[in-house]
């Protein structure tokens, strides 16, 4: 699955670069969307990201390409690799694995469907 995001002025830090918190939010969101599309009707919450390392800075006006691939499925959780690249150059700026767990309406873990 792929998605794109345009970096706007409200996404920048005080130095004029993309604020890392926005990027992490987008990465979390696209992993959640991928899990939700793969398992319709299931509720998911993020339990972790394996690594947070910003490889390159990003300026306003940059179009970012998010690629997400499922890498693991457990009894109650699923893990997705998310790679973020600059659309114009293909330069990788960030990658991580996001693990989401399925929960019931009370927030307790529950098994993934078969």
Image (tube, helix red, strand yellow):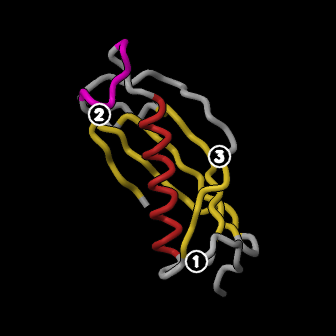
Determine the residue positioned at 48% across, 65% down. Answer: 34
At which x and y percent is residue 55?
Answer: 54, 25
Task: Identify the residue under disc 3.
Answer: 49
Question: Bounds of the magenta span?
Answer: 9-15
> Who is closer to the viewer here, 20 or 90?
20
Based on the displayed image, in which of its 4 quarters is residue 33 positioned?
bottom left
Q: From the viewer's perspective, is the residue at label 2 or at label 1 nearer?
A: 1
The mark nearer the N terminus, 2 or 1, is: 2
Task: Identify the residue under disc 2.
Answer: 7
> Answer yes or no: do the residues labelled 2 and 3 have beta carbons within 8 Å?
no
Q: Is residue 65 magenta?
A: no
Q: Distance from label 2 to label 3 (Cα)?
A: 22 Å
At which x and y percent is residue 109?
Answer: 71, 72
Q: Residues within 10 Å of mark 2 (few under 14, many from 20)?
A: many
Work out which residue is located at the far right of the displayed protein and give it.
75
Based on the displayed image, in which of its 4 quarters is residue 54 positioned?
top right
> Who is closer to the viewer here, 108 or 65?
108
Determine the residue positioned at 62% across, 75% down. Answer: 106
Q: Which mark is residue 105?
A: 1
Q: Distance from label 1 to label 3 (Cα)?
A: 23 Å
Which quadrant is the C terminus positioned in?
bottom right
Work out which residue is located at the far top of the displayed protein and give it.
15
| Picture layout, residue 60 above or below residue 6 | above
Residue 30 as seen in the image, left or right of residue 109: left
The mark nearer the N terminus, 2 or 3, is: 2
């Amino acid at each position: 699955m792929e998605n794109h995001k345009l970096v706007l002025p409200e996404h920048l830090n005080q130095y004029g670069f993309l604020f890392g918190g926005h990027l992490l939010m987008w990465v979390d969101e696209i992993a959640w969307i991928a899990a939700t599309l793969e398992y319709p009707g299931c509720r998911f919450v993020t339990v972790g990201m394996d690594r947070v390392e910003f490889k390159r800075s990003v300026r306003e006006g940059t179009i970012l390409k998010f690629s997400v691939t499922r890498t693991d499925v457990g009894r109650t959780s699923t893990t997705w690799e998310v790679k973020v690249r600059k659309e114009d150059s293909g330069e990788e700026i960030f990658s991580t694995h996001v693990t989401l767990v399925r929960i019931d309406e009370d927030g307790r873990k529950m098994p993934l469907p078969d």
